[in-house]
Image (cartoon, rainbow, N blue to C red):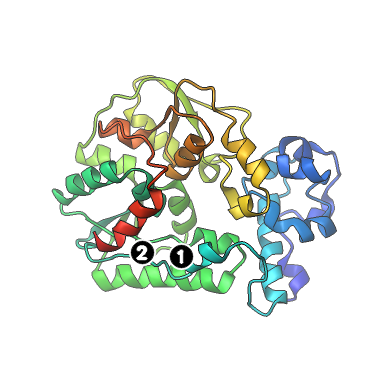
Amino acid sequence: MCRRNKLKSKNDVSECIHCHVCQKHCEFLKKYGIDIGDTEKLKELSYHCFLCGKCTEVCPIGIDGRDYILKLRRENVWEAEGTFREKGYGMLLKEKKDYIYKNYRNATGKCILFPGCNFPSFYPKTMKKLVKLLKEHGIGVAYDCCGKPIAELGLEVDEKRIIQRINDEFEKRGVEEVIMLCPNCYTFLKPYLKVKVTDIYAKLEELGIGEKNLESGKVFLPCPDREKREILASAERFVKGSLESVKGVQCCGLGGCAPVKEPEIAKHMASALAGEKKVYSYCASCSGNLTRGGCQNVRHLLTEILKTYEKPDVKKSMINRAKTKFT
C-alpha cells in the first residue's frame, strides 16, 4: 500500500471545509491558527497535538482528526526508516519501549488484574488493598505498560511488538480474563488482546467488593472514554445519584505525549479545575496531573469505593512505580 493511502482516514482531511470549529475547541489548533485540514502545517506540528479527540468530536463532517495526527506521526517514523527523530522523549522511550518495571511474578490464575503504570504510581496504598482483596478470589496481578505512549509516538513496529509480548505473557500463564483498571489500557488493548477484558468496576460488583457509596458530583472524563463512556457507565454502579461530566476542559494536559512540545498549554489544561471543591476521576493519569495543576480535591473513584480515600502521591509517583518491579 502506498504511503498516501495510509494517510487516509475514515474521512479524508482534504474534505475539510475550514469552518474553524475544531480550532475554536482546541488550544493547540487555536495557538497556531490552523484547522485539521491544514495538512502541511500539521505535518510539522504533529507531536504538538494532545490527541484528545476534541477535533473529531466537534467536526461537522466527521473527520477523525486524532487518527490523522497519529498517521502523520507514523509517517514521520517511516520517513526516518524506523528511527525516532523527535527530541525530548528520551526518558519516556527508555522506560516504555520495553517497560523496565514489568513484573508478572504474581500473574497467577485464569483471571488477573492489569493496573497499568499510573494507578500504582499515584495510589500505592489503594493498589495494595485492591491486590489483597482480589487475591482472596484467586486473582493475580501483572504490572506492565500497555504500550499506548509508544503507539502515540508513531512507533508502529514497537507498538505491535509490545502487544504481542503481552498476549504471549497471558498465553504462557493460561490467563483467560484480564481486569483493566486504567481507561487508557482498557481502550487501547481491548481490541488486540486474545483474552476477555473486564473493567475493574464490573468485576468489583461481580465479586461483591467495595461500597456503593459515591455521592452525586462532577466527574472528569478521560479522553479515551469520552465517546463511548463504557467505563463511566460501569463505575456508576457505585454511585447513589448521578455523575455530571465536567464541561469546558479539553484534556488533563498529558495527552498525546504533547507536553514535551507544548508545556504552557499542558500547564493551562492541568490548572483548569484548580478552583473546584470536588471532582471525581477514574483515570490515575488525570488525577495526578490535575492535582499537580492545583486541583487539590480530585478523588479517584476506586479510593472512594474501597474506602482508602487516598490522594494522588504526586511527589513519590516515580518511586512508587519503580517498586512494582519488586512487588
Residue 60's place in the image compared with 324, above or below, is above
Q: CA distance from mark 1 to mark 2?
A: 8 Å
Identify the residue under disc 2. 101
Where does residue 204 sit, x and y in percent of width and height? 26, 40
Between 323 and 36, the one nearer to me in the picture: 323
Task: Work out whether residue 60 can be spotted.
Answer: no
Identify the residue under disc 1. 95
Please tell me which of labels 1 and 2 falls first in the chain.
1
Where does residue 196 sit, x and y in percent of width and height? 34, 57
Do the residues under discs 1 and 2 have CB atoms within 8 angstroms?
yes
Q: Which residue is located at x 20 percent, y 63 percent? A: 108
The quadrant holding residue 274 is top right
Badge 2 crowding class, 10 Å Cα cut-off, few under 14, some 14 to 19, many 20 or more, is some
Q: Which residue is located at x 49 percent, y 56 percent? A: 188
- Three-letter amino acid code at the position of disc 1: Glu
Where does residue 10 sit, x and y in percent of width and height? 70, 55
Where does residue 132 sit, x and y in percent of width and height? 18, 47
Residue 12 left/right relative to 296: right
The quadrant holding residue 17 is top right
- Three-letter amino acid code at the position of disc 2: Tyr
Q: Which residue is located at x 18 percent, y 44 percent? A: 133
Q: Which residue is located at x 24 percent, y 44 percent? A: 130
Helix, strand or loop status at disc 1: helix
Q: Name the quadrant of the N terminus.
A: bottom right
